[in-house]
Structure formats: structure tokens, C-alpha cells
Image (cartoon, coloured by chain):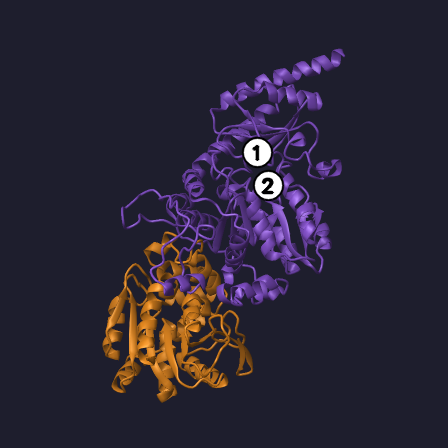
Chain colours: A purple, B orange
Amino acid sequence: MSKSSYLGADTIALHSGYQPESDHGSRAVPIYQTTSYVFDSVDEASALFNVEQGGHIYSRITNPTVAVLEQRLAALEGGAGAVCTASGMSALFVSFFSLCSAGDHIVSAAQIYGSTVTLLKHSLKRFNIDCTFVDINDQQALAAAIQDNTKLVFCESIGNPGLAVSNLPAIAETAHAQGIPLVVDATFATPYLNNPIEHGADVVVHSVTKWIGGHGVAIGGVVIDGGNFDWLKSGRFPTLTQPYEPFHGMNFWEEFGPAALAMRIRCESMRDIGAAMTPHNAFLLLQGLETLNLRMQQHVSNAQAMVTWLQTQDAVAWVNHPDINADAHTKALFPKGAGSMLTFGVKGGRDAGAAFINALQLSSNLANVGDSRTLVLHPGSTTHSRLSENDLIAAGIGADLIRVSVGIETLKDIQADFSLGLRAAAKIVAQQAEA
Amino acid sequence: MYIQVDNANTFIATGGKPFAAHLPTVVLLHGSGTDHRCWALQARWFAFHGYSVFAPDFPAHSLSEGEALTSIELMAAWLVRALDTAKVDKVHLVGHSQGFLVALEAAGLLGDRLKSITALATASAIPVNPALVETAQSNPKIAAEMMLQWGFGSPHQYGASSVPGMQPIGIGTRIMANNPLAIDLIACNAYEKGAEKALQLANVGCPSCVIIAAQDRMTPKKEGLKLALDLNTAAQIIADSGHMLPMEAPKESLNLMKKFIQSLET
């Protein structure tokens, strides 16, 4: 479907949503570090509160700096509108919250981020919203899992940490055939590598904290309303197509059409839940976004080189990256490469893996991805440690799995660092053999 | 609200409040390929400030069923039937682009039911490039993109939005790509009675308001000024806006619309 802008992606990342303001001509997007905004008059205040005119009221709902990031990300993904949130998880929560009510149901990919699993499996369950997890690329299983009360299909375009690539066109076709929208967490892909709306997604979510920011200094999320889903025709979405009592009976679909979901999130979730992105974080994340495309080229290039290099190392048991033996849909969805995440296992299992991580000097052992620096983690004992054994298997996480977010350092320096780790792992294997 | 016009389910946006025919009624008419949502903010203001809003989706556009109407004359006659169905008597007609051509034509049919007429980003004639019509017939999505690329002013090409977080070009493209754009464009191109109708309205002293977008490349400023001259009224010019004026400058356009209409109701 059509883009939201006629500018190229590199230009959008630098310019979209902001032109130098008239008062001072600031070339950079200013930080509007304010909680609230002076109204010209009581009439103007009333008009803003009743959505009779656009503008800012209170920074929990909207903020000029945050709005630039929202409009820029919506343009990059080809959406109709966007809402930034305090984190990627809150972006997911407000998406689910805006589409589902008690008694509803979600179908989700099994191979997804651990905290998203707990949100879908436990937290939403407390509010009587159920979730069925499926192999998302098994279209028969997906179709069979959709129920009369299903409100959305969810997947990650590249799964965390299993790195399975979701076949977005096929999944969208299956979901749409039953009047269900597809919500995609595209964090691992970034708008540079893949735009899910072009491939059938209806809602795109990012943890902006990751590659979009790239610097690892600010947490944030975004929901992008694709604007293509016909909520009325589906007949399943009273939150968007029926009058909303707390807003003078506003009917989001009738009044805002392609931006109905974004407006509902703005009017309800930001008001009632208030998981707002701070203006300072929006500013920091904008600095990252401006160079996203350049950084992603190096991320992907380094990741592909690291895959090839790891495959030649004696201490390595296996290596996983979506570009290895890529199937047709992976090649079609990711012509520039399927991201800069890789996983691998060292010979010697969990103990050798721990030795590998402990020996690293350049790479950082921490719970984040998408930093410009190379990051490593053992998901089984950290991000996914709260999952049951069965859930770990379903998510594609073995005990020896090491997750690597390949950074943009000089390639030989990453390789030298990993050599230290692999030597430490090899020592464990030798000790195991002696014992 | 939905009403039946010519046996077709027809959507009329009312600005978020129930329609009340006894109140002064403001009729908001959308342009080629668009729908009532181009008036989303203006409609809410009028509805919550003592007016009834009647903003239809023309047949086969967005939420309205029926067959697309193939001429401005047919659209005007349809509008009068829709108003009759809703038991609306006197009206302020407001039209954007093609919507104003419909208003001009409907004015003659409404007679003294017409209280005023307001033009936004329009002209008395709207010739359409044949290449755009051909593209709209063969590939509506591409045509919608072409039209909005041409239609939105510079700030919106750079992602500006009067509503924080929104992408008006993305919203507009999705609406236009699914509506009968080619039929609308052909109807616009064929309508040649605009100047004559404007002069007639001026002769009978119909109050009128012409709002021009300074960056309008589809109905350029000079054509808007000519229309204002024909209607014997002063033109109001909004800077930094292109042809998609109701969406690009909703606050500025509303201020001019309400100042004009309020002056007639007090």
C-alpha cells in the first residue's frame, strides 16, 4: 500500500515531521521539555479537548518533540499515523488493549520475545483475554487457531531469539480471510530492512530503544497504524466502530477512518494508562533515527561476516541467522539482509557458553539488542528465564544458545573478542573431557 | 448517521453529535475521491457549537453505498434529495474543490433554502489532466499518490500534520485509492457552468466566502481570486497550505468558515 511520503527513506529519516521552527530557526528538532501548553482562550482549550482542532494539551497525550518522531516513523513505515510510548512493551500493551476486551482472544507466534509471551500468556489472561500460540508459518495451524472471538494475529517479523522469519504475506492472507488484522513487532528488522505494511501487516510495533535509537541511552516504543484494515467490515471491533462513551460518543472509524486505531490509542490509552514517551527520550531517539539507514548497512554487513567466520570456528557447535539457507519468503522480505542478530551454540553446552560470555572484553553481556556496540546474552538464564521448559522449546531456545546483537565496530575487533571467548569455551570442553 | 437516498444506504457525518434538523445546518461537501473525513475537525466544532452538520459521503464513496454519480449536475440533484430525506430546510453550503462545484450547481436547485456558500481551495472550473484521469482509471492507487503529491503543500510533503502523530498524506491516499476517483475527475473536468452559476449567486446577493490556499497547484490562487470576483466577495488566503486545505489547515480554515457563517446567524 501507498507510502505516507514521497521522499526517499534517507530523507524521511532526517527531515520528516519537522521543518525549522519560525521563532528561532532551530535546525535540529527542539526538545519541548514541558508538561503542558498555554491555551489562547477558553474556547481554544475546549476545542482542543473535544478534538475540534489539533494541537497539544498535556505531554502525557502529545508533545511536539514526540510528535516529530511519531510522524517520522509513520512516514518511514508507510503508515497513516503513529503513537510513541514509554517502551516497546507499552506499545504492545496499548495495541492489544485497544483492540481487545475481556472475553477476546489473540493468536500469536510461539517464537517471540519472552516478556511478550508473559504479557500474552499471563498478564492479559488476568483480564480474560486468552492467547493461543502457534507455529506462525504453518498457515493451517494459524487458520485453525482463529476463533469467533479472535481479535488479532501477532508475530515478530524476525523472532526473538529464535530468528525465525515470519512469512508476512501468507500470515496476513490467512488472518484477513477471517477478518482479523495482523499486528507485527518489527523491532529486529527496523524500517530500513523491511516495511511490514507493504507486506500485509495492519499494525506495526517497534521497540525504538533498539536499532532505531542505536545508542542505548533511551527507552521507547511506537505503534504505527497501517490504515488499510477495514475495522467496520470485519465486524469484530466495537472499540473502533461503536460510540466511545468517555469521549462524547466518538466513533473512531467514522470520524478518522484510516487513523482510527491511532486515535483510539491516543484518546484512551495515553489518557488512561499514560505510558508516554518523554520529550527528551524522543529527542535522543530522533538523533539515532537520523542515521539508522547508514548504521544498519554496517550492522548487517558485520553480522553476515560474523556468521561466516563463526561457521569456521572449531569451538562452535552451530550458528543461526535467517540468511543461512534462507527460504523464499525470507529472501523476498529481506533483500538487504535479515538483520544483525545471530545465535550460536558453543561445544560444551551451557557451561562452555557461560565461559565464552565471561571471557569477552569488547562485547557487552547485557539485556538489550540493537545497540551500536556488540551485545551478547544467554537468554535461557535471563530474558527468557521465566518461561517453562516447553515454552523454551517452542521459542526455539536451547540451553546452549547465545544471542548476539552484532554491532558496528571494526569487524576484526569483534572477531578478536569472540576468539577470546571461544578459547575459554574450548578450555571447558577440555576439562569436561578430562573429567 | 445513515439515511436512505435513492434506495442506497448513505452515510452522513454529523460531527459527533446527533443530527437535529431544526438547528442552523452546515453542509460540508468533500472533493474528488475523498470523503467526509476531510472535515473531521471542522465538523466537530460546528456540531458542538449550535449547528447541525451534514457531511455526506457521496454515493460509492467510503461509507456510502450506491452507484457513483457521473456529473456535477447529478451530484447536486442527489444532494438536494439527501437534504430532503433528512428534512433539512435552509443550509450553509461549504465545498472543497469538486464539492464546491456541487454546491454551485445545488444552489440553483435550493433557491431560498440556501443561506450562504463557502468555497475552499477551488475554482469555478477544474480542468483535469487527461493523464491523471487515465491513471485513475487504470490504477487508482497510483493516481491517488500522484494527486496528493500534487495536492498537498510543501510542509505536508515533509510530514507536517495539524493533528500530532498523524500522516495526512497516508490517510488521504488510503481513502482516495478506494473511492471512484476517476469518475469524480471526469465529472469535474466536464463541468463548465461554474462561472455562470457564481455570477448568478452574486446577482441575487447570496452571501459567499472564498478561502484560497497560497500553495494550491490544482486550483491555483489566481483561479480562486477570479472566483471571488465572480461571487463579488473578498478572497481569504491561507499561507503554507496546498490544495488539500481542509486537512492541511483545519484550524485556519475553520476560523474563516465559522467567522463567516456566524456573522450570518447572529
Callout 2: SS: loop
The answer to whether residue B194 is left or right of residue A273 is left
Looking at this view, name the residue that lies furthest to the bottom: B112
Q: Estimate the x, y position of residue A73 in percent, counting from the top left.
A: 46, 47
Instruction: Please state, as top left, top right, bottom left or bottom right, where the C terminus of chain B lies in the image.
Output: bottom left
Looking at this view, name the residue that lies furthest to the right: A435
Q: Residues within 10 Å of mark 2 (few under 14, many from 20)?
A: many
Image quadrant of residue A43? Answer: bottom left
Amino acid, disc 2:
Ile
The answer to whether residue A259 is left or right of residue A238 is left
Q: Estimate the x, y position of residue B254 in percent, counting from the top left.
A: 35, 68
Q: Residue at x 51, y 37 (%)?
A: A210
Residue position for label 2 = A158
Looking at this view, name the residue that lies furthest to the front: A42
Callout 1: SS: strand
Give the Cα separation between the discs numbered 1 and 2.
Answer: 9 Å
Amino acid, disc 1:
Met
User: Which chain letter goes with mark 2?
Assistant: A
Taking A238 as reference, is A71 above or below it? above
- The circle drawn on residue A341 is 1
Q: Are marks 1 and 2 in contact (CB under 8 Å)?
A: yes
User: Which chain letter goes with mark 1?
Assistant: A
Q: Estimate the x, y position of residue A187 in percent, counting from the top left.
A: 55, 42
Q: Estimate the x, y position of residue B172 in percent, counting from the top left.
A: 44, 62
Q: Residue at x 54, y 24 (%)?
A: A363
Looking at this view, name the residue that lies furthest to the top: A434
The answer to whether residue A122 is left or right of residue A260 is right
Taking B43 as reference, is A412 above or below it? above
Taking B37 as reference, is A88 above or below it? above
Is residue A137 in view from this perspective? no
The answer to whether residue B113 is left or right of residue A151 is left
The first of marks 1 and 2 along the sequence is: 2
